Image: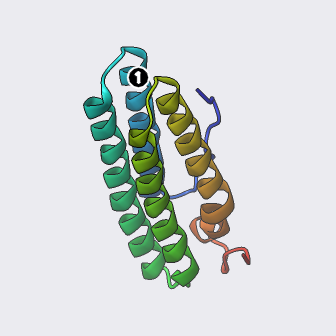
Amino acid sequence: MSEQKVPASGNQSIDLGHDELSRDIEDIVRHWKLGSGDTVLEACVRKFRETAARHFDNEIAILDEMGAETDHHRQAHDSFLSEIEGLLDNTLLHNGNRRWFSLVETLERMLFDHEIIEDSRYYSLFHGKAEPQPG
C-alpha cells in the first residue's frame, strides 16, 4: 500500500484525525492480508467511513470557528462519504480477493487527494495567515 504521508496542517486536532484515518486504512490492509472475510473487511471500511465523518465534523467546526467559508468543503466531505458507500457496495457485489486491494488503493488515493487538494486550502489559517488559498 502507499507510503504517501499527508503533510501536517498546523492544527493538532485535524492532524490527529488524519492519523486516525490512516490507521483505519492500515487496519483494513492488515485484515485483508490475514485473509479476513467480507464481513470483517466491510466492518473495517464502515469504521473508516465513521472515522471520516467524525473527522469531517470536527474539521468543519474548527474552520467555522475561525470564520472560514466552508460550503464547498462540506460538499467535498459529503461526496467523499458517499463515494465510500458506493465503493463498498460495488466491492461487495463482486468476488475475489483483489477487489479489496483495489478498494484500499482507492481509499488511500481519495484520502491523500482530499487532504492535499481540499484541506490544504485552509492550512494558511492554522499558520497565522489571514485568508485560505482560493479554490
Counting from the top left corner in percent of width and height, residue 33 is at 43, 16
Foreground pick, 68 / 44:
44
Q: Which residue is mark 1?
A: 32
* Quadrant into which the N terminus falls: top right
Counting from the top left corner in percent of width and height, residue 101 is at 52, 29
Quarter of the view holding residue 26? top left
> Up-down: is 51 above or below 34?
below
Q: Residue at x 61, y 69 (%)?
A: 122
> Up-down: is 67 above or below 132?
below
Find numbered disc 1 in the image and state the secondary structure of the residue it sits on: helix
Count of labels in the image: 1
Q: Is residue 124 left or right of residue 58?
A: right
Give the residue type that dot 1 points to.
Trp
Q: Residue at x 44, y 26 (%)?
A: 29
Quarter of the view holding residue 6? top right
Counting from the top left corner in percent of width and height, residue 35 is at 36, 16
Foreground pick, 51 / 94:
94
Counting from the top left corner in percent of width and height, residue 24 is at 39, 37
Query: Coloring scheme of the render?
Result: rainbow
Q: Is residue 21 left or right of residue 129?
A: left
Foreground pick, 37 / 134:
37
Foreground pick, 67 / 25:
25
- Given the current orientation, which residue lies at the most extreme right position? 134
